[in-house]
Image (cartoon, rainbow, N blue to C red):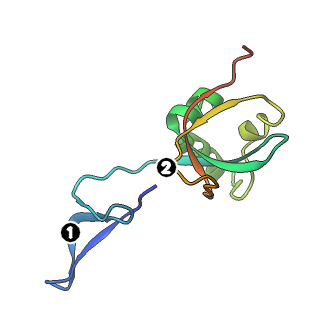
Amino acid sequence: LGKATPFFNPEKEEVEEGKYSCDSCNKQETNTSLRYCVHVKVADHTSTTSFLLFDREVIQLLHKSAYELLEQQLEFNRQGEIPSELIGLEGKNIVWVIRVHGTKKHFRHSSFKVVKLSNEEE
């Protein structure tokens, strides 16, 4: 995932107001939006990995947005604790569809973005 940082113009030697630079693709952007995600660790009988869940997937699983989870944690002074909604997923069978960039046989990445999931019985 890319991260937008304020654009530093080397010619003027200053940060340009309202302009951002994407760390992963090196493009300059003027339109950005704040997005929240939930970072989860998942495991099965073969391995463990981490997934990034954005609102579409968080709402599908928990019926709350990632921002609502954050607000709930702050409101009840539970920073650093795992939300009970996430603990409730422990032991459930969920099919995760992820997108992997790269073609190396032994691709290693610290976390993957989930593009689709299913927690239905069939």
Residue picked out by circle 2: 101
Q: Quadrant of residue 91?
A: top right
Tell me the residue at 27%/64% (across/down). Answer: 20
- Which quarter of the figure is the C terminus placed in? top right
Q: Amino acid at mark 2?
A: His
Task: Give the crowd class for mark 2: few <14, some 14-19, many >=20 residues within 10 Å.
Answer: few
Tell me the residue at 44%/48% (across/down). Answer: 35
Question: Residue 27: horizontal and vertical position, in percent?
Answer: 26, 61
1 or 2: mark nearer the eye: 2
Find out whether the residues at labels 1 and 2 contact each other: C-beta distance under 8 Å.
no
Q: Amino acid at mark 1?
A: Glu
Question: Residue 82: horizontal and vertical position, in percent?
Answer: 74, 49
Q: Give SS at disc 1.
A: strand
Position above or below: 118 against 31: above
Residue situated in front as seen by the camera: 73 or 97: 97
Residue picked out by circle 1: 17
Question: Residue 43: horizontal and vertical position, in percent?
Answer: 78, 44
Question: Residue 109: horizontal and vertical position, in percent?
Answer: 60, 57
Position above or below: 81 against 66: below
Residue situated in front as seen by the camera: 113 or 34: 113
Residue at the farthest left position: 12
Task: Give the crowd class for mark 1: few <14, some 14-19, many >=20 residues within 10 Å.
Answer: few
Closer to the N terminus: mark 1 or mark 2? 1
